[in-house]
Image: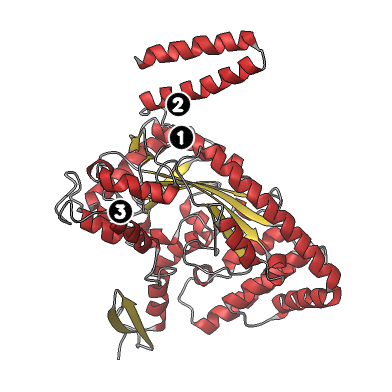
Amino acid sequence: MGIKDIVNNAHSSWMNSDGPEGDVITSSRIRIARNLSGIPFPNSMSTTDAEAVFHAVQQAVSKSNQQLNKLELLNMGELTPVERRVLMDKHLISPDLLKDYQKKAVVLSENEVFSIMLNEEDHLRIQCLLPGLQLEKAWELANNLDDDLEQVLDYAYSAQLGYLTACPTNVGTGLRASVMLHLPGLTMLRQINPIINAIAKLGITVRGLYGEGTQAMGNLYQVSNQVTLGLSEEEIIDKLSSIIRQIIDQERAARQAVHHDNKYQLEDRIFRAYGTLKYARLLTTDETMKLISEVKLGVNLRIIEGVDASVLNQLLVMIQPAYLQKQANRELSAQERDVLRAKTVRDELNINK
Amino acid sequence: MNCERCHKRPATVHLMQVINNQKTEMNVCEYCAGELQQETWGFGSDFNLNNFLSGLMGCGYSPSLKKSGSVACPKCGSTDTKITKGGLFGCDQCYETFEEQILPLVKRIHGTMQHTGKVPKRTGGRARLEKDIRLLKAKLQEAVSKEEFEKAVKLRDKIRSLEQQLQ
């Protein structure tokens, strides 16, 4: 399976609903920033420098031990805008890789667990993405891949400041550990802002689905560490995991409380959402994200039986404009997208009844 | 009127962007408007992390000591003015060139100036040995406090051999 297949297939392994704590945690991601010594950082590099990075990483990748999950490099310039956007919707690349894409490339593993973004803000951004709460496992995998690459690549490193990065906020470990949480219960009880404020004081940030500067859509929040220097990788992950576990407990309690206190209102709301998804003929992205969030809550609370939560996670990608245009294989007007979106949702929910 | 971007389809969307007080206006078709939005998606805000950083750096830098813009990194040519403006360093050498300004900045962000995490295996050299010795010494203390003397002796020998490698 090549990268084109990855773009064509809406499913990624992080969407599986059977990950640990899968009722609240959608996915866990580890990202490590690395730079090559002697080449200007991406913000001031020439096209020749960019190619030197591609070449060095290609060499390192071909010598890595990831035989079972072959890694493949693809220049962003070889993809269409729609294909690039699908990779972003699948969380395999960041929005930053869409800008000035001629100097950028991505290395993907066949199973989509690994991606290495080349010449994003740093030369390498090694990413490992797993379903559910699995930060330790994701770190172990990313760390091994990093060790493999380091056998060939000369990283920019200083004994005092650790791994040197373009932005001083990433210096040290270069590690960003983040978890995607589905928090409909806490959102309904208006507990999100107090939580955001509380954990911000602990050096942890909460963001919308696609990271910095984006809104929380479909009650999905991304929680990640802020500090990258002065703590070991394991300490960073431990601290984040223990905070996440507390949020999970609070979210579960919130869901039970809402269901207990407003049984009929909640069930009515969830079944209306389910009905709309199953029968609507026109759906906008925003509306669909909201409805999917409600149905997912219904599945988790066992109010709705027979719907696989993995399908709902996958739909979050399938309903995005880029994937719809990819399916239609042409440009679509806003209304055409709404029609195709509604049909896609109906088809997926009816297959998996 | 045709789209100003693709020059093919009729322009139906009027796009206006304000970046650093510079207003740009464009008449584009619906398709190009979508693509342009995808390209800038999530980056509409002018007030991002880098603006904050340049603020932090600005106050750590004392213009009375050196004339702003007078120092340039010998490797990538980035000047302190450029870095302060963009909030990003140009290359790994910048960390040495602008050390005076960078260390206080790093301290402001992370609360510390000392990395204690991973050391690259092949190129880490001395730093890796030092870290391994630190970890082994902690283990030795633990072994002694638990009166596990056989283990402690092994650890002590290991520390000695690593310390010899350091010299």
> A311 or B100, which is in the foreground?
B100
Kindly report which numbered mark, 1 or 3, lies closer to the viewer in this rendering: 3
Q: Residue at x 29, y 73 (%)?
A: B20
Q: CA distance from mark 1 to mark 2?
A: 8 Å
**On the image, which quarter does residue B40 sit in?**
bottom left
Labelled disc at residue B131: 2
Q: Residue at x 74, y 54 (%)?
A: A249
Please provide percent x and percent y for residue A217. 58, 69
Instruction: Name the residue that disc number 3 marks.
Output: B60
Q: CA distance from mark 2 to mark 3?
A: 31 Å
- Is B97 on the left or on the right of A323, as rendered? left
Q: Closer to the N terminus: mark 1 or mark 2?
A: 1
Please provide percent x and percent y for residue B2. 30, 87
Q: What type is the residue that disc 3 sits on?
A: Gly
- Is A247 on the left or on the right of A67, as rendered? right
Q: Chain of mark 1?
A: B
Q: Secondary structure at mark 3?
A: helix
Q: Is residue A119 above or below residue A291?
A: above
Q: Closer to the N terminus: mark 2 or mark 3?
A: 3
Q: Secondary structure at mark 1?
A: loop
> A263 or A110, which is in the foreground?
A263
Q: Secondary structure at mark 2?
A: helix
Q: Chain of mark 2?
A: B
**On the image, which quarter does residue A266 sit in?**
bottom right
Q: Residues within 10 Å of mark 3 (few under 14, many from 20)?
A: some
Q: What type is the residue that disc 2 sits on?
A: Lys
- Is A346 on the left or on the right of A324, as rendered? right
Kindly report which numbered mark, 2 or 3, lies closer to the viewer in this rendering: 3
Q: CA distance from mark 1 to mark 3?
A: 24 Å
Instruction: Name the residue that disc number 1 marks.
Output: B116
Q: Is residue A24 above or below residue A126?
A: below
